[in-house]
Image (tube, rainbow, N blue to C red):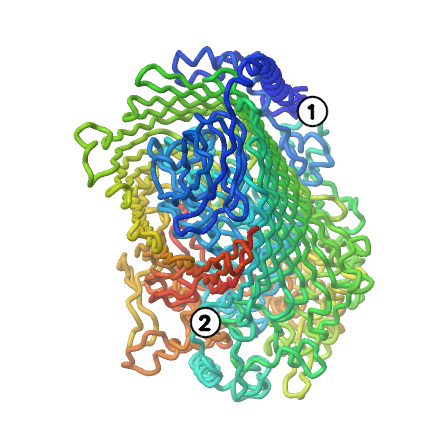
Amino acid sequence: MKNNPIYRGRIVLFCVIQIFSVSLYAHSLANIEMLYANTHVVGLMQQSQIHGKITDSNGVPLAGVSIIVKGTQRGTTSDFNGGYTINVNNNQVLVFSFVGFKTQEIPIHSRNELNVIMEPEVMSLDTVEINAGYYRVKDRERTGSIAKIESKTIEKQPVNNPLAAMQGHLPGVNVVQTTGVPGGGYNIEIRGKNFINSGTDPLYIVDGVPFGSQSLGAVDISVGINGANISPLNAINPNDIKSIEVLKDADATAIYGSRAANGVVLITTKKGEIGKTQFKLNMSSSLGQVSHFLDLMNTEQYLELRREGIVNDGFGAFLENPAFDFVWPDLKTWDQNRYTDWQKELIGGTAYRNNVQLSVSGGSAQTQFLISGAHQKETTVFPGDSNYKKTSFHNTISHRSDDDRFKINLSTIYTLEHNKMPRTDLTGKAYVLLPNAPALYDEEGQLNWENNTFDNPLASLQEDYKVNINTLIANASLSYELLNNLELKTNLGYNNYRLESYRILPSTARNPEFEFTPENYSSITTNNSKRSSWIAEPQIHLEQHWGDINLSVLVGTTFQSESAEQLVIKGTGFPNNNLILNLSAAKTLEVRQDSDSDYNYHAVFGRINLDWKNKFFFNLTGRRDGSSRFGSGRQFGNFGALGAAWLFSEESFLSDNTFLSFGKLRGSYGATGSDNIGDYKYLDTYGITGFEYNGTNTLEPTGIFNPLFGWEVNKKLELALELGFFNDRIQINTAWYQNRSSNQLIGIPLANTTGFTELTGNFDATVENTGLEINLHTSNIQTDHIQWTTAFNISLPKNRLVSFPDLETSTFANTYVIGQPLTIVKLYHALGVDPDTGIYQFEDYNDDGSISSPEDRQWIEDFSPELFGGLGNTLSYKNLTLDVFFQFKKQRDYNNLRVQATPGYGNNGPVSLLDRWREVGDASSFMLASGGFNGGLSTSSNNQRRSSSAVSDASFIRLRNISLSYKIPKEFSYGMDLNVYLQGQNLFTITGYDGPDPEQSSQTILPPLRQFTLGVQLGF
Amino acid sequence: MKIIESNKQINIAECYFNGSIRRPIKYLLYFILIFFMSSCTDFIEVDPPKNVLISKTVFEDSSTVESALANIYYKMREQGMISGRYGLSSMMGIYSDELNYYGFDTNYIEIYTHHVSPSNAVVLAWWSHAYNLIYAANDIISGVETSVNLSQKQKEEFKGQALFVRGYMHSLLVNLFGSIPYITTTNYVENNKVTRIPVNKVYENIISDLEAAATFMGTSDDTGEHVVVNASVAKALLARTYLYTEQWELAEAMADDLITNYSLELDINSVFLKESSETIWQFKPNGVSYANTYEANQFVIRFIPGQTYALSDSMIGAFESGDLRLSYWTGSATSNDGLTTLYYPYKYKALLSETDSLEYSIIFRLTEQYLIRAESRTHLGNIIGAQEDLNMIRNRAGLDNTEANNKNNLLDAILHERQVEFFTEHGHRWFDLKRMGVANEILSPIKPNWKDSNFLLPIPETELEINPNLKPQNSGY
């Protein structure tokens, strides 16, 4: 009975109703009290009317400024001309507030006219509040390490995934785009790789609700186009985001316990603001192109190498024998003078993106709302009509009771994505297709197969891949202030992610000579996947003051349940290809996968924050977690952290210092964990494969099971110094961290003789990530007309395998080295081409006269970045604002040699291949040409691809983003806010890297595009 | 199915606060817990997913054990050494003198040109696939042993099939790699550090597994199509194994047993049809996507180019004039310009895309038993008996009786007969060249890179990295 989901759901529902009803009951009680209290006050004071005009420092009227009578709920907002009128008592105070400006409190003093000049808000540590997830904290009092990026930075980047907007902006956060194809994924690493085998995905929390970031793409369907890696975060429109906070150290993350080892990313969406109803319209168009093409051989060069290679292989005589012409059509039957630039043909197009977003927001002092809808369409650089469409809705409504005690906040994001792409990324083909390959289409407009000698790459355009994704993220947060210092709160959330995709293989995409028909060949594979989760988090917040001591306590509990299902069906054989989308027309159906998984998670968590004299801050956080991912007796884990900060600039000896305006020393230590290992791994099971033999469905052993595994533990230590100079116009934050991860859950590689290749288990190895992060923010010029600010961040991470018991005898002996990073690879040490033989030479480490693995693969290369960061400048003059942002990274990566080390193979390659060995005494960088028919030469070539020469510097400085925006003066815009902007993304890159893109070294995946965007923003 | 035994009432406080939460808020926390939770372990128990079965339950029902065995048959048909895709039939065909390779895949070129590197993907795939099946077989062997619900007869039937698979996989491995480990348990700790044992020990194990398999299983063919292993299949492999280990009497007796119980298919056109009377074991093709064999799909050349394999000149030249096998079992294709003609194995004719199931992939057929008996009899001095067996096969192919009349002539004639009979079938040719000691003599004139060390394939490189106990690498690699 206890496993019955209805029963389980009931417990939680009961809990939620409990806290909700307690809140409501308390609220109604308090209202009654209020009713009595208010009757005494009415009619005692004299009322008068006050009016005035509100402008900015340039004298431009400000519309929509909120004006509230202090201590009451009464208020109004300024009109189009900045004017306002309100009834007040003579001795009352008016509060003027507006986004981006300092809030001002001005006493009436019996005036009846009050004109106000709003001053822009300078980034001030006193006022900036940071979202730490379960609680908010003033930046100056913060004890943890939290990096933040705000809407004003996100909006300037024409990107369609929140992760993309973070690239380079946040210290310690390394984001890499996995493909330039729209709708693909991103890899993110916060402070390095902690665990030997699991990923680096952090925990994502969207408006308080955990958001599963694992792709539900099916390998059967989309591995060729986006690696089956479809980022669910695509569903979140970056323009709907108010801020993204990245929690990095133990102090900030321990409250998330077992899921926080890789850091926590908090995404907060925009909310309505108090003030008049505002309409905002944002429209933009982008053009995107591949930013860098490889320098590939032309027809003459290719044919020369190819011929030479075949002769070198000893097949020269065959080359002259017409009976063998069919083996090398490129040299014999194809036009020897034809040349096609396949990069231009296949990935040289322009990707267009059109984006329109309309939002309405506003509200009274009690209730605010925001409704926003956006639509976007993006095409690709491939030929054909592939495109990605996204429609997103974002609604929020916030309400607070008159007495400010009861608060409710609802927000909903609903996104529809439609992505139609070719089945395979054409990039790989663009780099290797022969320069004299025939035309893609014949005279009749049909795919050209050139008498069966050409494998037409455009066939994949007919093999559609299409995906529809619906994402719903709904969240409600209710709170009630039971006593002045005690607040009850409940967070409720629901996510639903549905993915429906298919891939078709119509017979028409195949060479007709194979005589494939719709009946015997055409197939469709469909994937229906969904994941839904709900969460309930009742909490109590308590504040207590005793003299110089402020105490704040938070206690809460989490119930979370997630279930996922995936159904993959393949239908084969259709009466004709027009019916291929209809599974019921298929002759045979195969269920390729029908799986489900449940994950339940339950925790209690708490925080005690102590503040003494506003100078010393202590923050104790903890969590006890239970997860269904572990076997009996190992489901629970404890995590916790202590953080402390000393605001030494508040000390008397520094308080009068005009140079140093802010100084804080902070540190933290604690433990977090990771249960990111997939569900049900502790069970000894047989899997239903979806295949059959002789009418019997097959059941296969799913692997070697291990019931004994538990949490991975990640201990984080951080020390940081935060300084502000000249009234905080210069702010420097420096943080040093040391994270040690132990009890590693790893797929321990097994010899194949065990029947499998790995076993999941905890391993007593320790991995350390240390690093230094520096964040600098300066306000260089701050006058009425000109503002210039600079932001710079740099991270210097270092990863190290600290200990690994019995590494030498373990299955990792040839993968890892103690003291070296986890990201190393062991390679042959290349010694260049032997001038006598023309074959690659390698260092023979064990002097046994032959080059063999693993003994001679002792050269170590590390692929993790040595340093990375960004430099941004914002310059504004009157209505014109210019942003320039550079991203930089120092790293090494595989170069072209990893793919192509032999001149003369039957595919195109870099022009550099021409520098090959030809005769004794040649000093060349490539070996002698080989057509690939000489197995002896292929060993030399294979080893070279796995040698030190296949790795080179892949550092880069990239102008990631430039944005120029102009705010059209009101006199020309009929009183509306009108902004025109031009943005560029990924404009140029300074790099010495020999490959498609230093950020994305793969030779088969479309690199990130260069984009230009023109847009207009309208507000009224 | 319950995963966690939680019959005892767990103290809530203990469950939450054996950690280190401090006293002042402890009471507050108690308070909340009482309100919001009923029990903390209940919530984090989940049912197992619908796409898996707990292993123990698999062996308590004969239909799920059959499914576990179906998985083995399925995998043997689809991947690895005996599959018609990338299996021994084509790979050892290009490694020996049966096929030429015209493609550009470096793994295949390495095999074709005798430059197999220890990182060769085909070799690794064969190795890992075989051990994966051996694990599956071992799990069935131990699983049915402890089963409560299965009858003794069912247990023996299942165990027999699994033992056969274990023996068969090892027999192929030992032929390709020489000294190998013999895996009889699912214990990964042991198997991860396992060492190689001498070839004769491997054969001892194979023979004992096959003998047990032959006694456990019956000889009846419940499927009516010979698509599942029975005692006869185990005997057929035993006969082959005795032959390979030169135990002539045993080989003769075992072949004899099969020859009495099966009948040779006399119509050469029907030998590879699914109803062929001489079939001892065949794979039923995937009825859903493909109705026919991978062999036909891989070898049949419809136009030039079209396939990456074609029969070698020496193979085509090996047929005596008038051999029906040349006309019935090979085909040819000529290019449009008439300059190129390629020959291909045409034993299996129906292509995958054809909808009627005409042919199944045959693994063991009776002809081999005739030739095993002929060879054993030759060694045992029964020249006339050997000639009779050999002539059965020759006559079916439209050839006259053999002229060989002494031991050496006969052995040559049998080697030749096996070449033209079993070409591109499961690597027979290569194994014959190797075991009869003629590989050097026959291959060195026609395969430029042939070396003595090519008798064995290299142990996969990654395997030696993970388990150094498997060292040393086979010589020459």
| Residue where numbered disc 2 is placed | A293
Q: Quadrant of residue A353?
A: bottom right
Nearer to me, B444 or A922:
A922
Height in image: A300 above or below B128? below
Callout 2 crowding tier (Cα within 10 Å): few <14, some 14–19, many ≥20: some
Residue at 43% over, 62% down: A986
Residue A251, x across and y down, in percent: 37, 31
What amino acid does circle 1 point to? Ile
Instruction: Give amino acid for label 2.
Output: Phe
The total of numbered circles placed on residues is: 2
Residue B414: x percent and y percent?
Answer: 63, 66
Is B378 on the left-hand or right-hand side of A611?
right
Q: Which residue corresponds to mark 1?
A: A6
Q: Residue at x 53, y 63 (%)?
A: A286
In what element is the residue under mark 1?
Answer: helix
Earlier residue among tags 2 and 1: 1
Work out whether residue B321 or residue A194 is closer to the camera in this orientation and state it. A194
